[in-house]
Amino acid sequence: MSAVNQVTTDADLIELGANDFDAVLTLEQVERYENDQRDVWSVARRIAMATLTRSKDELVEGFGHGLMPDELLDIIDRVGELKSVLHAQQELMSIAQARLMCVASVIVTGGDSGEPATASHNGGDCGGL
Protein backbone atom coordinates (compact mmCIF):
# COMPACT_ATOMS: atom_id res chain seq x y z
CA MET A 1 0.00 0.00 0.00
CA SER A 2 1.42 3.41 -0.87
CA ALA A 3 1.85 6.12 1.76
CA VAL A 4 -0.78 8.22 -0.03
CA ASN A 5 -3.46 5.57 0.60
CA GLN A 6 -2.39 4.80 4.16
CA VAL A 7 -4.93 5.65 6.86
CA THR A 8 -3.74 6.85 10.25
CA THR A 9 -5.62 5.16 13.08
CA ASP A 10 -6.09 6.19 16.69
CA ALA A 11 -3.51 3.58 17.68
CA ASP A 12 -1.01 5.15 15.26
CA LEU A 13 -1.61 8.58 16.78
CA ILE A 14 -1.27 7.28 20.34
CA GLU A 15 1.99 5.52 19.41
CA LEU A 16 3.31 8.67 17.74
CA GLY A 17 2.32 10.78 20.75
CA ALA A 18 4.18 8.42 23.06
CA ASN A 19 7.51 9.56 21.61
CA ASP A 20 9.36 11.84 23.99
CA PHE A 21 12.10 14.33 23.23
CA ASP A 22 14.06 17.11 24.88
CA ALA A 23 15.17 20.45 23.48
CA VAL A 24 18.30 20.14 21.36
CA LEU A 25 19.06 23.84 20.96
CA THR A 26 18.94 26.85 23.24
CA LEU A 27 17.35 30.14 22.19
CA GLU A 28 20.83 31.67 22.12
CA GLN A 29 22.05 28.98 19.73
CA VAL A 30 19.07 29.58 17.44
CA GLU A 31 19.63 33.35 17.46
CA ARG A 32 23.32 32.86 16.66
CA TYR A 33 22.44 30.40 13.89
CA GLU A 34 19.87 32.78 12.39
CA ASN A 35 22.35 35.67 12.44
CA ASP A 36 25.02 33.50 10.82
CA GLN A 37 22.60 32.42 8.10
CA ARG A 38 21.72 36.01 7.30
CA ASP A 39 25.27 37.38 7.52
CA VAL A 40 27.32 34.55 6.04
CA TRP A 41 25.08 33.12 3.35
CA SER A 42 23.16 36.10 1.99
CA VAL A 43 25.89 36.97 -0.55
CA ALA A 44 26.22 33.37 -1.81
CA ARG A 45 22.44 33.08 -2.03
CA ARG A 46 22.16 36.32 -4.01
CA ILE A 47 24.95 35.23 -6.37
CA ALA A 48 23.27 31.86 -6.92
CA MET A 49 19.92 33.51 -7.59
CA ALA A 50 21.48 36.09 -9.93
CA THR A 51 23.16 33.23 -11.81
CA LEU A 52 19.73 31.79 -12.50
CA THR A 53 18.60 35.03 -14.15
CA ARG A 54 21.32 34.99 -16.81
CA SER A 55 22.16 32.89 -19.85
CA LYS A 56 25.49 31.14 -20.27
CA ASP A 57 26.69 33.89 -22.63
CA GLU A 58 25.70 36.58 -20.14
CA LEU A 59 27.51 34.79 -17.33
CA VAL A 60 30.66 34.32 -19.40
CA GLU A 61 30.52 37.99 -20.33
CA GLY A 62 29.93 39.11 -16.75
CA PHE A 63 32.48 36.89 -15.07
CA GLY A 64 35.03 37.16 -17.87
CA HIS A 65 35.89 40.82 -17.28
CA GLY A 66 38.42 41.29 -14.51
CA LEU A 67 37.50 38.21 -12.50
CA MET A 68 40.41 35.90 -11.80
CA PRO A 69 39.82 32.13 -12.18
CA ASP A 70 40.53 31.68 -8.45
CA GLU A 71 37.74 34.15 -7.64
CA LEU A 72 35.27 32.27 -9.83
CA LEU A 73 36.29 28.98 -8.20
CA ASP A 74 35.76 30.61 -4.79
CA ILE A 75 32.24 31.64 -5.84
CA ILE A 76 31.55 28.09 -7.02
CA ASP A 77 32.78 26.76 -3.66
CA ARG A 78 30.63 29.23 -1.71
CA VAL A 79 27.50 28.23 -3.63
CA GLY A 80 28.37 24.57 -2.99
CA GLU A 81 28.80 25.28 0.72
CA LEU A 82 25.42 27.01 0.77
CA LYS A 83 23.92 23.95 -0.90
CA SER A 84 25.29 21.82 1.95
CA VAL A 85 23.92 24.24 4.55
CA LEU A 86 20.50 24.15 2.91
CA HIS A 87 20.59 20.34 2.91
CA ALA A 88 21.31 20.44 6.66
CA GLN A 89 18.44 22.90 7.11
CA GLN A 90 16.16 20.49 5.25
CA GLU A 91 17.11 17.78 7.74
CA LEU A 92 16.43 20.15 10.66
CA MET A 93 13.01 20.97 9.21
CA SER A 94 12.22 17.25 8.92
CA ILE A 95 13.05 16.82 12.60
CA ALA A 96 10.95 19.85 13.53
CA GLN A 97 8.04 18.51 11.48
CA ALA A 98 8.27 15.09 13.16
CA ARG A 99 8.26 16.76 16.58
CA LEU A 100 5.19 18.80 15.65
CA MET A 101 3.44 15.63 14.46
CA CYS A 102 4.16 14.01 17.85
CA VAL A 103 2.64 17.03 19.59
CA ALA A 104 -0.37 17.02 17.26
CA SER A 105 -0.98 13.34 17.97
CA VAL A 106 -1.06 14.00 21.73
CA ILE A 107 -3.52 16.85 21.24
CA VAL A 108 -5.73 14.90 18.80
CA THR A 109 -5.86 11.79 20.98
CA GLY A 110 -6.41 13.68 24.23
CA GLY A 111 -2.98 13.11 25.70
CA ASP A 112 -1.15 10.15 27.12
CA SER A 113 -4.38 8.69 28.52
CA GLY A 114 -5.48 7.69 25.04
CA GLU A 115 -8.91 9.27 25.59
CA PRO A 116 -9.97 11.02 22.38
CA ALA A 117 -10.23 14.79 22.57
CA THR A 118 -13.80 15.32 21.41
CA ALA A 119 -13.21 18.88 20.22
CA SER A 120 -10.55 17.87 17.72
CA HIS A 121 -11.17 14.19 17.04
CA ASN A 122 -14.39 12.21 16.88
CA GLY A 123 -12.94 8.71 17.10
CA GLY A 124 -12.26 6.17 14.37
CA ASP A 125 -9.64 6.73 11.76
CA CYS A 126 -8.12 10.16 11.26
CA GLY A 127 -7.98 10.03 7.48
CA GLY A 128 -4.21 10.30 7.15
CA LEU A 129 -3.36 13.08 9.61
Image (tube, helix red, strand yellow):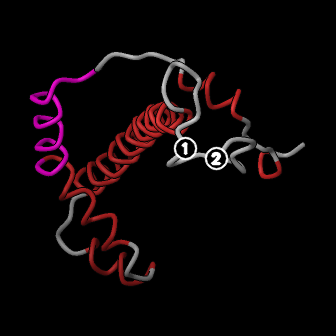
Quickly name the residue at label 2: 122
In the displayed structure image, the side of residue 124 where residue 70 appears, left or right:
left
- Magenta stretch: includes residue 60: no
In the image, what residue occupies the spot 74% across and 42% down? Answer: 124
Mark 2: give few (<14), some (14-19) or many (20+) Cα within 10 Å.
few
Q: Does 118 appear above or below 15?
A: below
Residue 51 lies in what quarter of the image?
Answer: bottom left
Q: Position of residue 40 (x, y in %)?
A: 15, 46
Q: Which residues are magenta?
A: 24-39
- Residue 35 shown in magenta: yes
Q: In terms of secondary structure, where does tag 1 sit?
A: loop
The answer to which of 16 and 14 lies nearer the viewer is: 14
Residue 3: x and y in percent read 78, 45
Query: In the rendered structure, which amino acid carries the disc numbered 2?
Result: Asn
**Numbered label tally:** 2
**Amino acid beneath label 1:** Thr
In the rendered image, the vertical position of residue 40 relative to residue 64, given as above or below: above
Q: Which mark is residue 60?
A: none
Question: Where's residue 125, x and y in %?
Answer: 74, 43
Instruction: Find numbered disc 2 in the image and state the secondary structure of the residue it sits on.
Output: loop
Q: Main secondary structure of the magenta part?
A: helix
Question: For mark 1, what is the residue?
Answer: 118
Q: Is residue 50 left or right of residue 108?
A: left
Distance of label 2 from label 1 (alpha carbons): 6 Å
Residue 104's x, y, as percent? 48, 38
> Which residue shows up at 51% across the image and 19% down it?
112
Residue 9 image-quadrant placement: top right
